[in-house]
Image (cartoon, rainbow, N blue to C red):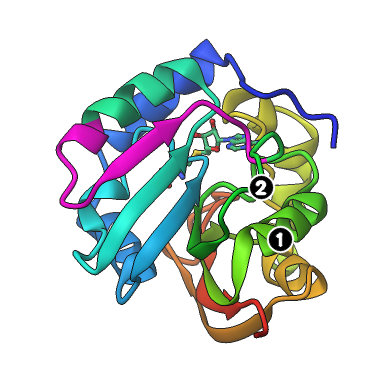
Amino acid sequence: MTAPDTLDNPLFARIWTFMSSHETDWLRDRRRENLAGLSGRVLEVGAGTGSNFAFYPETVTEVVAAEPESQLRDAALIAAAAAPVPVTVVASTVEALDAGEPFDAIVCSLVLCSVDRPQDVLRQLYTLLKPGGELRYFEHVASPGLRGGLQRVADATFWPRLFGNCHTHRDTEQAITAAGFAVTASRRGHQFPAWAPLPVSEFALGSASRPA
Ligand SMILES: C[S@@+](CC[C@H](N)C(=O)[O-])C[C@H]1O[C@@H](n2cnc3c(N)ncnc32)[C@H](O)[C@@H]1O
């Protein structure tokens, strides 16, 4: 893969830092749900400002949190210091991560929309996970119908530029399965009411395992 090791995206970093500091209870509950029951060594990719850190259960022995964007990483370092479990923040895109000791679990939240080549990234995550290990994901995903059309227009115009390369019309669960994972639990829902004309509403929250 030819992605850079780190990223500088000051506009998005400011937008995301503002959004992270105004998260709803609904979003915090989804973060908690995505992390519930994890244990052992966990890799979190694209950790942003570290919004997940507070919700790791104490059965997690270490979180390695990769965040390539410098301003977001600074915020993540502050969140790491207050986390209930040990969190090591590293400056890296997921593509540039070294394969070391494989992880018990990998966490993706609102990040597979932002990488350039989700299929390649997921294949890489597969190799970074122990056989039998779990990929936990909370991602907004492609919708059908009118909202799907809106997503395509947003993706082709302003949305990725404003929101750090976020693409709203991705079938992320299909990509997870295509990378070799077996989805073991999954649910879909909407973050906003059906009538709200927003490209990011439908989400998938689930768990997929690397077969043992
Ligand atoms: C929408 S934010 C989500 C942040 C965090 N995961 C959360 O749940 O709040 C997307 C994140 O993905 C990161 N990102 C973008 N491209 C990446 C890549 N190639 N590898 C790792 N992280 C990446 C961005 O820097 C940003 O922190």
On screen, residue 209 above or below 98: below
Quadrant in the rendering for residue 30: bottom left
Horizontal arrangement in the rendering, residue 175 relative to residue 111 (left or right): right
Q: Which residue is mark 1?
A: 127
* Label 1 SS: helix
Real-space CA distance between mark 2 and mark 1, rounded to the nearest whole angstrom: 8 Å
Indicate the position of residue 162 as horizontal and vertical percent values. Answer: 59, 24
Is disc 2 placed on a helix, strand or loop? loop
- Residue 81 part of the magenta segment: yes
Residue at 38% across / 67% down in the picture?
34
Residue 21, magenta (yes or no): no
- Give the magenta part as a residue range: 79-94
Look at the picture and state if 26 lies above or below 115.
below
Q: Which mark is residue 101?
A: none
**In this image, 172 relative to 46: left or right?**
right
- Measured along the vertical axis of the image, is residue 10 above or below residue 174? above
Q: Earlier in the sequence, mark 2 or mark 1?
A: 2
Left or right of residue 84, residue 86 in this image: right
Residue 211 image position (x, y, % from top left): 67, 84
Q: Answer with left or right where residue 189 lies relative to residue 29.
A: right
Q: Which residue is mark 2?
A: 99
Quarter holding the C terminus is: bottom right
Amino acid under label 1? Answer: Thr
- Which image quadrant shows ligand 1? top right
- Asked if residue 202 shows in the view, the reply is no
**CB under 8 Å between discs 2 and 1:** yes
Q: Residue at x 77, y 59 (%)?
A: 123
Please name the amino acid that badge 2 sits on: Ala
